[in-house]
Image: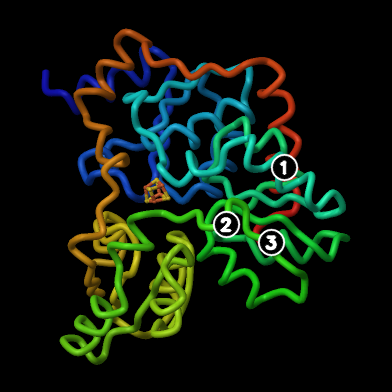
Amino acid sequence: MNIVDRIQELKGEKDISILAHNYQPPAVQDIADFLGDSLDLCYRAQELEETTILFAGVRFMAESALILNPEKTVLLPDMDAYCPMASMLTPDILDEKKRKHPDAAVVLYGNTTARAKARADVICTSANAAHIVNSLDEDVVLFGPDKNLRYWTQKQTDKTLIPVPDHGYCYVHNSLIRPEDILYLRDRYPRAEVLVHPECVPQVQEVADHVLSTNGMLAHARRTSADEFIIGTEKELCYRLRKELPNKRFYEIETAVCRDMKRVTLQKICHAMEHEESKISLPHDVLESAREPLERMLSLGRG
Ligand code: SF4
């Protein structure tokens, strides 16, 4: 039996649903039950009937799935798949900033550790950051860890957003997608619309036609009459875009690859399902404290 058939068999045998992020390798996207961005997958995780969730993504995503579904088993096929940006915001850095700004609300991007989430008032994603910030009573907000998402969100609010940490970033969007990469592709494909992710640097955001989350890019490409797009985010989103919209053309930035997202393979998924290894666990107090800010985000909706 080949590995794909074995994974499909194990889903039924062990009551497992596979959630995969849009940046996962094509072979993993193909065997997922649900594919999406972080926000979409949070909603999906809550709707599942299966007793086990296998999360094909990085650790903070699997942690969020467990925080929202503490009664389920959550598996991460590679326990070393971390988001380097999430590691930039330590509890100590956040606590110090909170001491300096005791009246500020704390809005953290989902790309944070569970311990950081446990100290937040509400979580946001790239799909709903401005909506979440604008829904708060406070006029001053500690916002982190991504400085570029903070820049994009600040443009859509009158509130004061204080970065925490001072310079958090995603190396893929911040450093591997440069303005010159976009301009080069725009020169080659002058009819293409430029869609970029808000984790990109301001200079990239400024040359784009639209700044969108990954699911936002898919939704936009579906509804617009344009049929060519330059995609400024992790390159694997283009696999999903091409599969779902085969009559449109998508041009990726070849170098925009997240190493940690690529740690997940079919072999590791199959192994984790067979042996139910790589179970995510969190201390009880962290699990409990991180739930309220996540649920608050989900109740505020997408905006
Ligand atoms: S693409 Fe960036 S934000 Fe997403 S997991 Fe990789 S390093 Fe983290």
Q: Is residue 43 above or below residue 176?
A: above
Q: Amino acid at mark 1?
A: Ala
The secondary element bearing badge 2 is classed as loop
Quarter holding the C terminus is bottom right
Q: Which residue is mark 3?
A: 162
Labels 1 and 2: the sequence-earlier one: 1
The secondary element bearing badge 3 is classed as strand
Q: Does mark 2 have its CB less than 8 Å from ligand 1? A: no
- Cβ–Cβ under 8 Å for marks 1 and 3: no
Discs 1/3, front: 3
Q: Position of residue 120 (x, y in %)?
A: 72, 42
Labels 1 and 3: the sequence-earlier one: 1
Q: Amino acid at mark 2?
A: Asp
What whole-number distance in Å separates the C-alpha atoms at marks 2 and 3? 8 Å
Q: Which mark is residue 112?
A: none
Q: Residue at x 39, y 75 (%)?
A: 195
Q: Which residue is mark 1?
A: 120
Q: Residue at x 19, y 24 (%)?
A: 267
